[in-house]
Amino acid sequence: MKDNTNLICSLTSPDAAAMRRDMDDAARHGADVVEMRLDFLAAAPGRDDLRMLLARPRPPVIVTFRPRREGGRYDGDESARLHTLQLAADAGAEWLDVEQDVPPSARPRGAKLILSHHDFEKCPGDLDETFAALRCEKPDVAKVAFAAAGPQDALRALDAIRAAPSSTVALAMGEAGVLSRVLAAKCGAFGTFAALARGAESAPGQPTLQEMRSLYRWADLRPATAVFGVVGCPVAHSMSPAIHNAAFSAAGVDGVYLPLLVQPGPAAFGRLMDGMLARPWLGWRGLSVTIPHKENALAYVGAGRCDELARRIGAINTITIGPNGELRGDNTDYAAAMDALCAGLAESGALSQDIRGDTPRLRHDLLAGKPVALLGAGGAARAILAALRHYGADVTVYNRTFDRAAKLAEEFSARAAGADRLAALDQEIVVNCTSVGMHPHVDQSPLPAIPPAVRVVFDTIYNPVETRLLRQARAAGCTCISGLEMFVNQGVAQFEIWTGRAAPRDVMRRVVMQRLL
Ligand code: NAP
């Protein structure tokens, strides 16, 4: 970091008294600076309001009174707006944020100047020129905030901070821009903005103060901090940032893990990867990959740099980036599923005396010859079928769309059956890879009832932790395995691939449970 980057809490309170309370709250919760967004107040503040708001003791304050033309809420008279900003400077505000289009002669004086430019449509074509135009006017801080089309725009914001000769804020707004907000600290920005609470954001994509500090490990970010993330679309619901950041904290790993919203398609995926690899100074070390990019990831990394089963599955969920940009691809989904299944079988005792007491991972081969009914023929089914067949299980694929089941089964030398055969299935082990029963359709089950031959049911769904299918199975006396185990296992495997250390499994499991229950 060039200097300490300020964690700035934007206050969007509806009245002056609430803003004062929120300021005290923000300071208590670790904000270095607060930004008072006067345009969010129901009525423009007068001299007395500003004196009350700026009375000490308090943290350092930026006062912003953003007009509609620059994405704010104020649509009144311009000279009244500038007069209010002048009153704020007179009352002791440390900084005023003033828009670039305000003529220098009309700008309030008496506080440090943050000169800002906003683009709510796109990243300016030439960001360097945009900054150069701001710096010509010699502000104390030059600030550009723009809408991000993808994480590659957020990387451009970081380039601008890194290249800046003086105090700078460069923010990519929107969900795709989160990395510019968090990694601003690695690049030495003047500051980054956070909301006091969810729903109180002053700009799209703004994390909360709490997320910055506890989820994204703000206090621990250093220039050398390794960067990881999950690539997907959608990605906001992903629990991976919570799991991996908690694991980094618990294990003392100098790393941070971010959500990366990348639109579907190989081109968008390639843009992110090219952008990351072109910036080795950011310290990218690994990516989790989720829907719809697992196949794109394998294609980008190259089959020759992926493990054998991942090649057969045609998808990877893990990319490791070496110090010189060398890539490796892994699929931790299938091993995670096999570990969960074998641990469940070992626990059950009744079915599998032969694998009780052994490390599940070492005993995958004991799946050989076991009769398995695999429900579903999508991405998860494909990975699990490949692994089950690899270890010699005798698998029948059941799917609503029979043709998909038939095609998948043929590829891996398994059998196929239509959904009409589900009620009569006669395998001992059932693995559900359909999305039937997943939140919010928690009252649905892929099986009308548990057939008598079934002894073990593994539902890959992890939200909810106990699905209707698992409740049916428990009532029928079966051994039940939740998708939660698979989900934790795949994260544990990623952590171990990236760090070479044993993962704090209990911490990771607890984080998932806290989010799901
Ligand atoms: P996918 O590719 O979209 O496949 C969905 C499958 O569900 C297809 O076979 C589809 O049948 C079937 N299906 C969907 N709605 C159905 C309905 N109403 N009735 C009958 N069948 C239906 O999804 P995916 O990526 O394979 O994910 C499937 C499940 O695996 C998800 O629930 C997910 O939670 C779980 N999963 C868990 C983990 C973990 O770590 N625990 C990891 C990955 C996935 P058709 O072919 O007929 O459309």
Image (tube, helix red, strand yellow):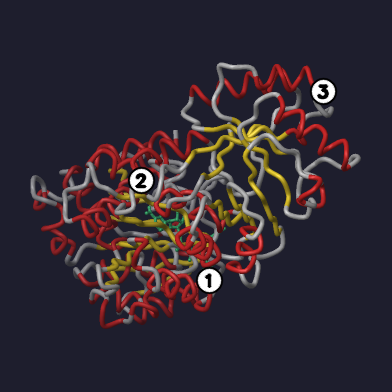
Q: Amino acid at mark 3?
A: Gly
Residue at screen point 49% across, 74% down? 271
User: Is the shortest distance between ligand 1 and the CB of mark 1 under 8 Å?
Assistant: yes
Q: Position of residue 162 (x, y in %)?
A: 45, 60
Q: Position of residue 239 (x, y in %)?
A: 43, 47
Q: Secondary structure at mark 2?
A: loop
Task: Name the image quarter holding residue 381.
Answer: bottom left
Residue at screen point 49% across, 67% down? 292
User: Is the shortest distance between ligand 1 and the CB of mark 3 under 8 Å?
Assistant: no
Distance between the Cα atoms at labels 2 and 3? 40 Å
Using the image as rendered, state which of residue 1 and residue 325 is in the foreground.
1
Residue 130 appears in view:
yes
Residue underneath mark 1: 401
Q: Secondary structure at mark 1?
A: loop
Q: Which mark is residue 174?
A: none
Residue at screen point 63% across, 37% down? 95
Distance between the Cα atoms at labels 3 and 1? 67 Å
Q: Amino acid at mark 1?
A: Thr
